[in-house]
Amino acid sequence: MIRTRFAPSPTGYLHIGGARTALFSWAYAKKHGGKFVLRIEDTDLDRSTPESVKAILDGMEWLGLDYDEGPFYQMQRLPRYKEVAEQLLKEGLAYYCYASKEELDEMREAQKARGEKPRYDGRWRNSTRTPPEGVAPVIRFKTPLEGDVVIEDLVKGKIFVQNSELDDLVIMRADGTPTYNFGVVIDDMDMGITHVIRGDDHVNNTPRQINILKAMGAPLPIYAHLPMILGEDGERLSKRHGAVSVMQYFEDGYLPEALLNYLSRLGWSHGDEEVFDMEQFVGWFDLDKISKSAAQFNPEKLLWINQQHMKHADNGRLARLAAPFLERDGCDPNSGPDLEKVCDLLKERVNTVEELADAAVYFYKRLSLSPELESEHCTQDNRLNITELAERFSGATWTREEIGKTIKAFATEKGVKLGKIAMPLRVMATGEAHTPSIDAVLELLGRDEVLARLDRFKG
């Protein structure tokens, strides 16, 4: 059975790159009837925080990337790492290194001065010296001195790395915690991970991990390293490119399925398909369709895809999502027309849930007119016309069709174009110059509220 995993470090929020990695790992497992595992790699004690763990879990939940197993936490597996490290020591595949930080810094400076690549020189690899007193050692893995590592990468193709280019990496720190390259290997082995799908910033780690797996006689997973995501300027995606935290998009009113739709198109494609749901994506997805080149993040394209999903979203769901934004704007969503109906009227005109709520404010709050709108549309003639029209509304059947007929008949009677009546009516009733069709807006506002609003402009 195929088993994939997403293994973020809780040193910050779930960012766009991590979300895409999780999505591709999740989709591959789903496509092949496998299992998707969530693992929290929290052994970086200086940088890992409970807040970051929560941000990752919240992001996964919001996106709907449900995991079959986990979350597993590395800090709860310390005895296991210690057990494997001791086994490697016993078999002569690892050794204690007592070199101090000062020694190592001095060694690297000397190497740089000679024009060499800074790397550990193996000084404790086969040492018979007496260990210095009071020094807590690290444990280093004995990297093979000869041969090479072959990575059969499903995205990048075959990669060769000579063992002579690798040094003896630390696998256990002096405080008893595993380093990344050791913990990840033990976890992947114990959890039966068959496919490691991750960012290509890990390519350099892979030969080290393969050597450790081979030393333990463990089966090798299949690797697929995803090209990085770049900003519009061609630089690696970072905070300066805008919102890169997944939950920031939630706070800005994006739909999770739209963000997933967009992320799936970053480095993967299926013909000319632009807008699709996750069921379609899983059915189409495979690793051989992933591009070898870096993807470019385009906020405008994401916004457009979100707009497409907004148009087809369930009105009840949009109402639930929009309500908090309306409350933030000082509105009570229960004090006006049915919010579901308002969403149905407005959703094709907006890009995000936040924009939807902003567009709906006038349904739940009487807006003050700007001086420009008042001077342009609230002339004495317009006030007289709208006052007379309001009297006709009093006796009209309150449906969109009848409201529209009443407005058109009034304009015809006055011998003016429809806009000469509809525009000042719109401004006086809503406080806005741009709304959906005014007959639809008035129907939702309700007769009593419309008449009360127009009464303020009685001529």
Image (cartoon, rainbow, N blue to C red):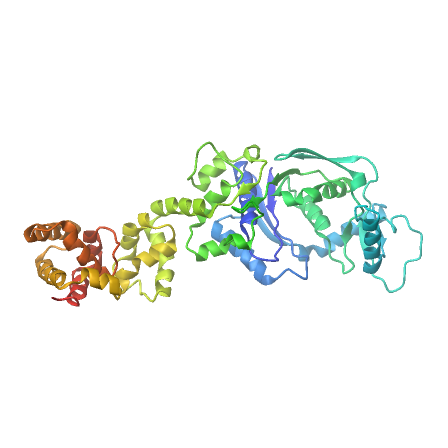
Instruction: Determine the residue positioned at 48% across, 35% down.
Output: 283
Vertical relation: 365 (above or below) 257: below
Vertical relation: 34 (above or below) 434: above
State the image coordinates of residue 431 (x, y, percent, origin top left): 24, 61
State the image coordinates of residue 249 (x, y, percent, origin top left): 46, 54
* Quarter of the figure with residue 50: bottom right
Q: Nearer the viewer, residue 91 or 151?
A: 151
Instruction: Determine the residue positioned at 38% across, 52% down.
Output: 352
Residue at the outermost left position: 413
* Quarter of the figure with residue 214: top right
Quadrant in which the C terminus is drawn: bottom left
Q: Nearer the viewer, residue 458 or 148?
A: 458
Q: Nearer the viewer, residue 166 or 367?
A: 367
Instruction: Determine the residue positioned at 35% across, 64% down.
Output: 329
Left or right: residue 334 compared with residue 399: right
State the image coordinates of residue 324 (x, y, percent, origin top left): 38, 61
State the image coordinates of residue 287 (x, y, percent, origin top left): 57, 35
Instruction: Determine the residue positioned at 77% across, 54% down.
Output: 172
Vertical relation: 375 (above or below) 126: below
- Say whether residue 120 is visible: no
Left or right: residue 164 compared with residue 70: right
Q: Nearer the viewer, residue 167 or 209?
A: 167
Quadrant in which the N terminus is drawn: top right
Left or right: residue 22 compared with residue 189: left
How many tags in the picture? 0
- Say whether residue 270 is visible: yes
Left or right: residue 445 compared with residue 409: right
